Image: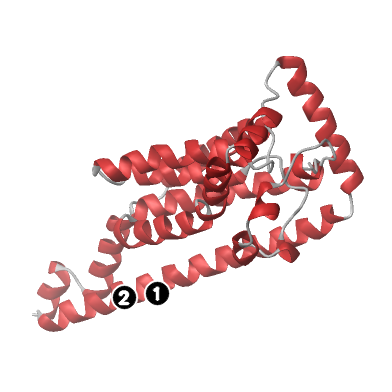
């Protein structure tokens, strides 16, 4: 029994390491795609600016052009400017990585759902970046102040300018991926503080990406649609795959040997 338990433990450790290696490969592939798309769209600033101007005209025609008012509000209130900068910088990758690590070790199935949803929505987003390059308000030449570059240097540490796609405003994955993380976290815990955080963080990010002049209102709306598509496809994938626990149990019984195997040995 002890030998079987030890072998089962080794199998679980091996399964975890294989899973971790898989995550590294997926992330590396996504990073390569991002760099390729960045190089593809980097040479089209004129197109990106023209697309941004047309987008703003459309927003004005339907009355949702709130960008200037929100940016001006953050400029007029130094505490708010600092707050939205902080949310934009520290509320994205640090939160995604922290929640992802928590889900990977405690709620594997929710992690896989989140991973797949981010991957699918990212691929859709990359298609937007390549086909419809969009300058953010701060680079549109329409008088928006870039609060991040003007008053903060932390973002250059988390995302160096040399690896940033300047014309990838549409859709806002900055908001969209925070929303996916919030959904995954909310559904994985019953702790009230964590659930409040899961609901609050994406809402604050939606405000911050606009108030820092990094995204248009419609970038956030399209980001919502894109991650909803990613979430739906991820759920469909999960529906046709066996549950993680059931699969691991099947592997353990097969490799270690279940009751029938023990009888055969006797």
Residue 116, placed above or below residue 58: below
Kindly identify the residue that appears in the image at 49 percent across and 53 percent down: 115
Image coloring type: secondary structure
> Residue 40's mark?
none
Q: Which quadrant would the N terminus be assigned to in this image?
A: bottom left
Q: Nearer the viewer, residue 52 or 23?
A: 52
Kindly identify the residue that appears in the image at 70 percent across and 53 percent down: 150
Return the residue found at the far bottom: 3
Q: Is residue 250 left or right of residue 84?
A: left
Inter-mark Cα distance, 1 to 2:
6 Å
Q: Is residue 187 visible?
A: no
Q: Residue 256 lies in what quarter of the image?
A: bottom left
Q: x, y (%) of residue 102?
A: 35, 59
For disc 2, the neighbor class at 10 Å (few under 14, some 14 to 19, many from 20) is: few
Kindly identify the residue that appears in the image at 66 percent across and 44 percent down: 124
Q: Contact (CB < 8 A) between labels 1 and 2?
A: yes
> Residue 13's mark?
2
Q: Nearer the viewer, residue 12 or 80?
A: 80
Q: Which quadrant would the C terminus be assigned to in this image?
A: bottom left
Of helix, strand and loop, which one carries label 1?
helix
Q: x, y (%) of residue 259?
A: 12, 68
Residue 69, placed above or below residue 253: above
Of helix, strand and loop, which one carries label 2?
helix
Return the residue found at the far right: 46
For disc 1, the neighbor class at 10 Å (few under 14, some 14 to 19, many from 20) is: few
Q: x, y (%) of residue 237?
A: 47, 46
Residue 187, placed above or below residue 27: above
Find disc 1 in the rendering and name its residue: 17
Residue 70, placed above or below residue 111: above
């Amino acid at each position: 029994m002890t030998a079987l338990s030890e072998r089962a433990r080794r199998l679980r450790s091996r399964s975890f390491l294989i899973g971790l290696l898989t995550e590294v490969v997926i992330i590396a592939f996504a990073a390569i795609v991002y760099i390729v798309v960045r190089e593809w769209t980097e040479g089209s600033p004129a197109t990106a600016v023209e697309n941004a101007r047309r987008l703003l005209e459309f927003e004005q025609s339907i009355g949702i052009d709130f960008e200037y008012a929100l940016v001006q509000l953050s400029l007029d209130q130094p505490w708010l400017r600092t707050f939205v900068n902080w949310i934009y910088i520290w509320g994205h990758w640090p939160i995604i990585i922290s929640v992802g690590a928590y889900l990977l070790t405690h709620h594997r199935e929710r992690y896989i759902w989140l991973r797949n949803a981010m991957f699918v929505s990212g691929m859709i987003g990359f298609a937007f970046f390549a086909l419809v390059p969009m300058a953010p308000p701060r680079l549109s030449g329409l008088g928006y102040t870039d609060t991040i570059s003007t008053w903060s240097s932390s973002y250059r540490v988390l995302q160096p300018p040399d690896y940033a796609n300047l014309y990838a405003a549409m859709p806002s994955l900055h908001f969209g991926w925070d929303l996916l993380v919030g959904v995954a976290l909310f559904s994985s815990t019953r702790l009230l503080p964590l659930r409040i955080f899961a609901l609050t963080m994406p809402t604050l990010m939606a405000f911050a990406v606009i108030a820092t002049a990094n995204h248009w209102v419609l970038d956030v709306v399209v980001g919502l649609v894109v991650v909803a598509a990613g979430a739906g496809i991820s759920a469909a994938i999960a529906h046709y795959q066996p549950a993680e626990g059931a699969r691991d149990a099947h592997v353990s019984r097969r490799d270690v040997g279940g009751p029938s195997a023990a009888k055969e040995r006797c």
